[in-house]
Image (cartoon, coloured by chain):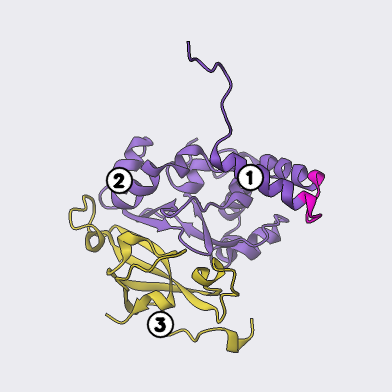
Chain colours: A yellow, B purple
Amino acid sequence: MKSKSVVKARFGPGDAVRVLDAYPLGHVRTPFYIRGKTGTVERLCGAFPNPEELAQMRDGLPAQPLYRVRFRQQDVWPDYRGSSQDVVEVEIYQHWLEKP
Amino acid sequence: MNDPGPYRPLTYFQLMEISLRELLVEKGVVTEEEVAEEVEAMRKRGYERGARVVARAWVDPEYKQRLLANGTNACEELGLEIPALKLLVVENTPEVHNAIVCTLCSCYPRMLLGIPPEWYKSRNYRSRMVREPRAVLAEFGLEIAERVTIRVHDSTADMRYLVLPMRPPATESWSEERLASLVTRDCMIGVAVPKT
């Protein structure tokens, strides 16, 4: 993919990120349960056409960096039962992330 | 008196599928034969493909490193074509147990594991696996010790996941083929572990 059709990655592994607490309509790949939660970037998976745009029959460009973000289960579910080390990892596009 | 017998009308999605398929054929985009071939190929693809990858990683440490670094390339190395599949292989260790779910729909590494089981697509599994993984795993008969971290992977976007389970003890003398026979579909989803 040509560099100008890719959005520059703003985060790197280990960075703390917060998922936007937003509820737009459409084909959104950010699960509800993770919105507004803070986690840590585990890795950058590459850049992919924005699925919210693809679903509208557009090209989805510029491509959005996609991250795997790691969340502590205790931060996601206040009543989580299990080890405090347990985590859930979710793929999230950059335009859904902000600095906490 | 009103028993309709074995007859059931088509569901909404069955009707959609037939309509779309007939349109594509009518417009010459695909032929009936091509559709039938693809469906047949999909049915034939089984989890044995994934099991081969796991067994190779168990016997060849260098292959394992390549598999963890780039799952897609490592599968192609074994002659397994997995078009359009961006594969991330996650490794179970004595400290970490991995499990896979897709809370949004039913994303699944079909090219390596075949057609997903019904429970993988169920609302029950999809909603509870992220919220109470230990309880769900226990229902599959898998008790994970408290000291082991559970890492659940929600397959929400472009990546697909495969769990690399731990090689069972006392299998040092086993051949790669025999090892592969231990690796079930559920082991590679992370709801079971291989047993001798």
Distance Cα–Cα, label 2 vs label 1: 37 Å
Magenta-colored span = B25-33
Q: Which residue is mark 3?
A: A11
State which chain disc 3 sits on. Answer: A
Q: Residue furthest left?
A: A79
Given residues A91 and B97, the one toward you in this image is A91
Q: Identify the image quadrant of residue B76.
A: bottom right
Residues at marks 2 and 3 on the same chain: no
What residue is at 33 percent from the left and 42 percent from the top? B136
Q: Position of residue A19 (x, y in %)?
A: 33, 72
Q: Residue furthest top?
A: B1
Q: Is residue A89 above or below residue B18?
A: below
Q: Amino acid at mark 3?
A: Phe
**Residue found at x 79% / y 44%:** B32
Q: Which residue is mark 2?
A: B134
Q: What is the C-alpha distance between the residues marked 2 and 3?
A: 31 Å
Distance of label 1 from label 3 (alpha carbons) = 41 Å
Q: Position of residue A82 (x, y in %)?
A: 23, 51
Badge 2 element: helix
Residues tagged by mark 1 and mark 3 found on one chain of the structure: no
Question: Where A24 falls versus B180 (above or below)?
Answer: below
Label of residue B17 in the image? 1
Q: Position of residue B91 (x, y in %)?
A: 46, 57
* Amino acid, disc 1: Glu
Vertical relation: B31 (above or below) A69: above
* Circle 2: residue type: Arg
Image quarter of residue B81: bottom right
Count residues near mark 2 (Cα–Cα under 10 Å), then give few for <14, some for 14-19, many for 20+: many
